[in-house]
Image: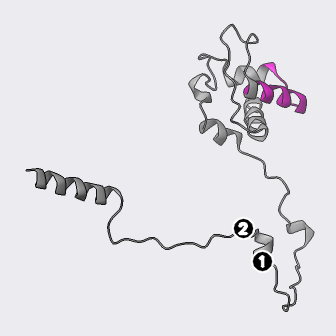
Amino acid sequence: MKKVLFTMVIAAGLYACGGGEETQEAKPISNATTEETTAPMKDEPAAKEETPAKEAAPAVAKKDGKALIAGSDCRTCHKDDAKLIGPAYQDVAKKYENNASNVKMLAEKVLKGGQGNWGEIPMAGHPNLSVEDASAMVEYILSMKK
């Protein structure tokens, strides 16, 4: 009985550790940046870039506030059109004009938390968000004004 149990434990351990025949292809590790990897060799002539300025990608891509909200815990306390624990997003949009100073102020409240503007229940801070993400979320909320 002990031999059978011992054999089963060994087999389970090999199975859990991936003791099968499958191997993964090793990928080379590189600290080179994309500029370093795409730069021509010393003996090779550099290719000319003929990209017109009109076709150049924008320097900063705008983040999708709606998607960021969907991927966060915001919907636990907020709805678009009705008060839940916190105010409805449409009520926030009615109260605050969509301008840079309000976006900055509300993004800071999202990051740090706050209390008192919408009642006694405090909003927890979200320090794990970046300022960019919080700003994109606020811009989306302020765009919901009806």
Residue 12 x/y as whole percent:
25, 55
Of residues 32 and 143, the one nearer the viewer is 32
In which image quadrant can residue 15 be found? bottom left
Label 1 Cα crowd, 10 Å radius (few <14 / some 14-19 / many 20+): few
The magenta segment is 95-110
Q: Amino acid at mark 2?
A: Asn
Tell me, yes or no, whether the two marked residues, 2 and 1, touch with CB atoms within 8 Å.
no
In the depicted structure, whether residue 130 falls above or below residue 19: above
The crowd level at tag 2 (other Cα within 10 Å; few <14, some 14-19, many 20+) is few
Q: Quadrant of the C terminus?
A: top right
The residue to which callout 1 is attached is 38
Q: Of helix, strand and loop, which one carries label 1?
A: helix
Q: Tell whether 5 sits left or right of 103.
A: left
Q: Which residue occupies the extreme right position in the image?
A: 53
Q: Position of residue 66 (x, y in %)?
A: 67, 39
Residue 18 location, quadrant: bottom left
Q: Amino acid at mark 1?
A: Thr
Residue 60 location (% of width, % of height): 83, 53
Name, please, the residue furthest toward the bottom.
43
Q: Mark 2 or 1 closer to N-term?
A: 2
Residue 118 lies left or right of residue 8; in this view the side is right
**Which residue occupies the extreme front position in the image?**
2
Specify whether residue 144 is in view.
yes
Residue at position x 17%, y 57% from top?
Answer: 7
Residue farthest toward the top in the current orientation of the protein: 120
Horizontally, residue 134 falls left or right of residue 98, namely left
Looking at the rendered structure, which numbered label has been put on residue 31?
2
Front: mark 2 or 1: 2
